Amino acid sequence: MTLADVWFVLVAVLLTGYAVLDGFDLGAGVLYPFLGRTEEQRSTIRSAIGPVWDGNEVFLVAGGGALFAAFPPVYAMTFSGFYLAIMLFLFGLIFRAVSMEFHHRDEKWARLWDAGFFVGSLLPALLAGIALGNVIRGVPLDANGDYAGTFLELLNPYSLLIGVTGLALFATHGAAWIAHKSEGALQRRASRVRLAGYIVVLLLAAASTVVTFIAVPRASDNVVGSPVGWAFIALLAAAALYTLWQIGAQADLKAFLGTTATIIALAGVAAVGNYPDIVPARDTAAETSLTVANSSSSDLTLTVMLVVAVIGLPLVTAYTIIVYRTFTGKVKAGEGY
């Protein structure tokens, strides 16, 4: 395994960490107007994610920074070719942050902040899946490795299917978190959504698998032809059975851990399906694909980054654990948010 391979894994781990941690934040925001029937319940949802949502985004920043340093051509292509989609993603995160911070300080505009919280959660949750769908499917690239398509081409049926699957997964993950952190009517409602949502996720994941075998055989061949791919498939099957079991048992924390394992398994399948490509070319020459080998930085850069990562990642992980331990337990309405 080369240093470039190591950084492919590390970038995938960081982005998966973001999907797991900020995924339930986004999912809670998507479900916010549907689960929160009263201001007290809406306040409980905000309080359930209030102490952790901004810290969760550290993994997005770290993943983007690692991509920039380890695979500069990939960073350049995605941030230029997917420019409008990325701006919409970031604007959504900004709207969500502003809504969270202003809601309890400006009650006159409470409805506006509620709408901003919902839209600011929906956009990133949907666009993240669409982006992943395009990366799996491949995009048109010119000889310089630049995106040669249009924004509308990113909204192709396959990527939209992956986007809807990701949205359903985040919403279910959010429902699992709310059920874990709340009590009473809100907890019961979140539990029902958690079960229905997880069934929808499994159906969409099955549909996405079938379509991938048909539309993107390169990715499916990589998964079924690799022991690591089969390991993630086994993890996904185990996570599905475990999550359904814990949902049925009304074990809220364990059900949340089950949806967490599901996200990790699906992310692993996607990563194995793409490797050694990072952004495969589609409808253009295969040699224009951005791969681990042709888009990585120098060994010196990757080595220095690895030293920093060995020091920094444990610190970030420890900080995250401390935060979640500090704010463990059920939340009450009005606890800061």
Image (cartoon, grey):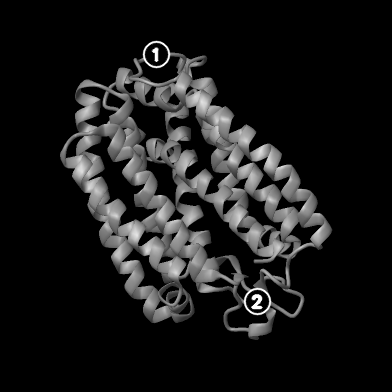
Residue 56 location in percent, x, y?
Answer: 54, 35
Residue 125 location in percent, x, y?
Answer: 46, 48
Q: Nearer the viewer, residue 17 or 76?
A: 17
Q: In which image quadrant can residue 55 be found? A: top right
From mark 2 to mark 1, how far is it between C-alphas? 51 Å
Q: Nearer the viewer, residue 192 or 231?
A: 231
Task: Check disc 2 and give the amino acid type.
Answer: Ser
Task: Check disc 1 and give the amino acid type.
Answer: Gly
Q: Is residue 180 left or right of residue 248?
A: right
Residue 69 location in percent, x, y?
Answer: 75, 54
Q: Which residue is drawn at the image coordinates 67% and 68% (left, top)?
A: 292
Q: Which residue is drawn at the image coordinates 20% and 24% (left, top)?
A: 185
Residue where numbered disc 2 is placed: 289
Residue 334's label in the rendered image is 1
Image height of 61 relative to 224, above or below:
above
Number of other residues with Cα within 10 Å of mark 1, as a class: few under 14, some 14 to 19, many 20 or more:
some
Which residue, as the protein is rendered here, is positioned at the far left? 248
Please indicate, yes or no, whether residue 119 appears anywhere in the rendered image.
Answer: no
Which residue, as the protein is rendered here, is positioned at the far bottom? 285
Q: In which image quadrant can residue 260 be found? A: top left
Query: Tag 1's secondary structure?
Result: loop
Q: Earlier in the sequence, mark 2 or mark 1?
A: 2
Q: Is residue 272 left or right of residue 147?
A: left
Image height of 102 relative to 14, above or below:
above
Q: Nearer the viewer, residue 15 or 153?
A: 15
Q: Which residue is drawn at the image coordinates 63% and 40% (left, top)?
A: 313
Which quarter of the image is occupied by the N terminus? Answer: bottom right
Q: Is residue 100 left or right of residue 280?
A: left
Number of other residues with Cα within 10 Å of mark 2, as a class: few under 14, some 14 to 19, many 20 or more:
many
Residue 52 location in percent, x, y?
Answer: 50, 28
Which quarter of the image is occupied by the C terminus? Answer: top left
Which of labels 2 and 1 is toward the front? 2
